């Protein structure tokens, strides 16, 4: 009898969970995950907000004391955020489930079938509008009056009514927000093996074949062999594993920078709401109501009670310029990036003005980013095989690293659709 082939999948975020769950059954899948169980922020925000005055929260990297699964690093002028642990960065996501595959359609990749599969399997809804608070309704009207065409954001919600605590990006305390931990559990239920606290370092390669994956499990060096290896350690993780394995990536990192424009409006209580309840698209960026926890805790201008803050987020598409390697992340903002950001700030100020706030009263948040990708981009030549020629024949990448450029929009659904296509390519090859 033929032996079933084995696959190692590295990472349990958007790409890793999707590809592992899809392949288990046809293959014997082992999932290697650097972190462990996700722990949401479970303390009172107000209690911690009081500590801001003590100067205790000096550096954004300290957020890890409050939220151990959130990895925060500094790169040039930006704070970089990603999730480490089961579910990857999807546990920190605000649950936006938008289709942003125009960047893949441009290079000839049609993912309609994969999106159909995801829509039929995942709990995605826009039916949260009836639970919006007065602040969100007022902001929605302001966007409408400005002709910004706001749209309720499709959300990954297991029940349409959440607790409206606003904690989406620091871990949903009620488990109503869906993330990829459910897919990992499903893969394990079907027989996949999950190894947590296992940080992959590099691959043993000879000729055009990967023979083994090397990792640290605590203080122990471990080695896993498989017929096929799929890297999905995220836009910051996969390029480093490849570089350690002598496969250089391109210096085309994008991150979708985020900046909030905020002001004080007493008792506005925008934060007691599903984050990013609606969004509006503009040339090169999107705008959406968002309470930025990094700015709230670490930016001196934000030392106001959360209930008194109003905040509009600019999430923009950035030029593919930057890199990550063992030495760290480098991400310079280009002139075009600054121009897009300036335009976003101007439009955000118009929103605040509609809410009765003078532009001199507004202040900016901390520039940060959490959508890294693009360092081994798919091209028109590789979309049919979903395999980059620089990789050994039995090595695939199935995370944001393969996206061809920044969409300036939430990418989870699009990364998952691409990962499903990678799974299909593996089966067909
Ligand atoms: C605060 C925040 C909010 C966001 N909100 C949204 C949203 O609402 N909607 C949306 O679409 N997108 C959102 N995003 C972005 C989205 O979460 C990420 O773009 C997406 O999860 C990336 O998927 P990925 O598979 O590339 O990587 P990840 O989801 O980051 O997964 C990478 C996985 O690899 C593991 N890993 C890393 N290195 C190693 C290693 N060496 N060995 C083994 N395992 C490793 C990690 O622990 C992780 O499990 C948000 C991001 C942030 C930071």
Image (cartoon, helix red, strand yellow):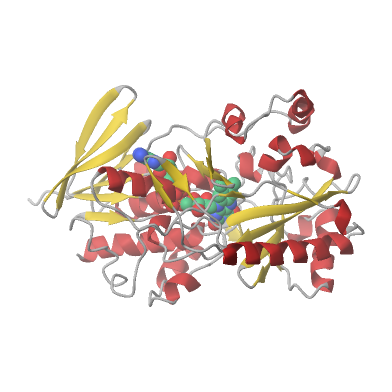
Q: Is residue 408 above or below residue 170?
A: below
For image coordinates 27% across by 23% down, the residue present is 220
Q: How many marks?
A: 0
Spot occupied by residue 75 in the image (x, y as percentages of width and height)? 52, 45
Q: Report the quarter where the C terminus lies.
A: bottom left
Dividing the picture into quarters, in which one does residue 266 lie?
Answer: top right
Q: Is residue 241 left or right of residue 97?
A: left
Dividing the picture into quarters, in which one does residue 91 lie?
Answer: top right
Q: Which residue is outermost to the front?
A: 335
Res 405 visible:
yes
Residues 48 and 42: in front is 48
Residues 74 and 208: in front is 74
Residues 118 and 223: in front is 223
Q: Which residue is outermost to the left?
A: 1
For image coordinates 50% across by 52% down, the residue present is 331
Q: Is residue 158 above or below residue 99?
A: above
Dividing the picture into quarters, in which one does residue 150 lie?
Answer: bottom right
Q: Is residue 355 left or right of residue 155?
A: right
Res 13 visible:
no
For image coordinates 9% across by 52% down, the residue present is 2
Spot occupied by residue 355 in the image (x, y as percentages of width and height)? 89, 60
Spot occupied by residue 377 in the image (x, y as percentages of width and height)? 37, 63
Spot occupied by residue 78 in the image (x, y as percentages of width and height)? 58, 47
For image coordinates 28% across by 53% down, the residue present is 248
Q: Is residue 24 left or right of residue 313?
A: left
Q: Is residue 373 above or below residue 140?
A: above
């Amino acid at each position: 009898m033929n032996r079933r082939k084995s696959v190692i999948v590295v990472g349990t975020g958007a790409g890793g969970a999707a590809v592992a769950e899809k392949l288990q059954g046809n293959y014997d899948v082992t999932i290697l995950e650097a972190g462990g169980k996700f722990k949401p922020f479970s303390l009172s925000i107000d209690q911690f907000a009081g500590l801001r005055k003590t100067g205790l929260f000096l550096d954004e990297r300290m957020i890890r004391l409050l939220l151990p699964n959130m990895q925060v690093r500094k790169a040039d002028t930006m704070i970089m955020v990603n999730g480490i642990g089961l579910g990857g960065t999807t546990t920190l996501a605000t649950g936006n489930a938008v289709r942003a595959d125009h960047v893949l359609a441009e290079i000839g990749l049609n993912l309609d079938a994969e999106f159909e599969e995801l829509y039929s399997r995942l709990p995605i809804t826009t039916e949260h509008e009836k639970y919006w608070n007065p602040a969100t309704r007022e902001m929605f009207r302001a966007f409408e009056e400005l002709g910004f065409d706001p749209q309720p954001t499709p959300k990954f919600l297991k029940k349409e009514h959440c607790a409206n605590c606003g904690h989406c990006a620091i871990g949903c305390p009620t488990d109503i927000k869906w993330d990829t931990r459910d897919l990992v559990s499903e893969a394990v239920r079907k027989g996949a093996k999950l190894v947590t606290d296992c940080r992959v370092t590099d691959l043993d390669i000879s000729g055009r074949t990967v023979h083994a994956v090397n990792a640290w499990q605590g203080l122990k060096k471990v080695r896993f062999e498989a017929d096929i290896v799929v890297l999905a350690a995220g836009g910051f993780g996969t390029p480093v594993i490849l570089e350690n394995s002598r496969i250089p990536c391109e210096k085309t990192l994008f991150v979708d920078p985020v900046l909030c424009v905020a002001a004080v409006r007493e008792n506005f209580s925008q934060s007691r709401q599903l984050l990013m309840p609606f969004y509006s698209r503009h040339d090169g960026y999107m705008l959406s109501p968002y309470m930025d926890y990094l700015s709230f805790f670490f930016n001196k201008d934000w030392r106001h009670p959360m209930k008194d803050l109003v905040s509009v987020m600019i999430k923009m598409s950035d030029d593919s310029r930057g890199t990550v390697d063992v030495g760290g992340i480098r991400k310079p903002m280009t002139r075009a990036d600054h121009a897009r950001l300036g335009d976003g700030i101007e439009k955000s100020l118009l929103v605040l003005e509609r809410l009765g706030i003078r532009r001199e009263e507004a202040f900016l948040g901390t520039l940060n980013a959490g959508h890294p990708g693009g360092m081994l981009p798919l091209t028109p030549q590789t979309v049919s095989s979903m395999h980059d020629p620089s990789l050994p024949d039995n090595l695939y990448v199935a995370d944001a690293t393969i996206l061809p450029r920044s969409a300036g929009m939430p990418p989870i659904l699009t990364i998952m659709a691409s990962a499903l296509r990678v799974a299909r390519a593996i089966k067909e090859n």
